[in-house]
Image (spheres, rainbow, N blue to C red):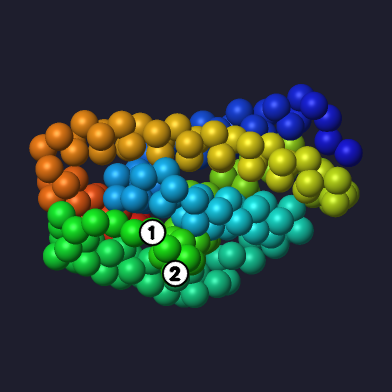
Amino acid sequence: MIGVVDVALFAAAFAASAATPGPEVVAVMARSLDAGLRGVSGLAIGIIVGKLALLGVAMAGLAAATTAYEPVLRVITWAGAIYLCYLAVKKWRTAGAATHPGAARRAHSFGLGIVLTMSNPVAIGFYVALLPGVVDLTHVHVKDYLVLSLALVVVMAAIITLYGVAALRLRRFLDRGGRRIVDRITAAVFLLCAVFIALR
């Protein structure tokens, strides 16, 4: 079983990688701007589930097989980009209207979180590069996966909360200038995120 030092190394490297602004971070901030911290919950769960799935795949020794599925990953990436464009257009057209985050919206956010994570080659590369140095992939145990999963969930939840709170503070600041401005900024962020993941 992996030791405390190995878990600390994994957590530190994962935190540095996950905290670097990318499509997931941008989506969290956009959702927080749009619907507050409550609206981030579905997206956050989707991102974490996606990262846990990637960790499991990598620990099962199947990370190298992802290159064989590159066309599928590209389709998922474009689907995520198109969905973000849809959200951007919708938010732009309804700028200023009241936001009511419901169950359906959280479900959409959950799916978006999974798509953003599973289609991110940087996230896949992280596991391929780091895991062999932390875990002997020829002798993987379920306990190893559970320990690393716990570290991943704690670190990712903290990062999502920090970015969500930062965006919420920005939202409160911008609310003084009117809800329409906040919504237009949110739409622009969604669009930029879509362009970013489509051009990777």
To which quarter of the image does residue 199 belong?
bottom left
Number of marks in picture: 2
The amino acid type, in three-letter code, at marker 2 is Ala
Does residue 92 appear in the picture of this structure?
Answer: yes
Q: Which residue has dot 1 on it?
A: 101
Separation of marks 1 and 2 at Cα, in angstroms: 8 Å
Q: Residue at x 74, y 37 (%)?
A: 134
* Element at label 1: loop
The amino acid type, in three-letter code, at marker 1 is Pro
Where does the image place residue 27, in percent across and percent down from the top left? 37, 51
Q: Residue at x 88, y 39 (%)?
A: 1
Observer-nearest of 59 and 177: 177
Observer-nearest of 182 and 102: 102
* Element at label 2: helix
Does residue 199 appear in the picture of this structure?
Answer: no
Q: Is residue 75 left or right of residue 89?
A: right
Q: Are marks 1 and 2 in contact (CB under 8 Å)?
A: no
To which quarter of the image does residue 93 belong?
bottom left
Q: Which residue has dot 2 on it?
A: 104
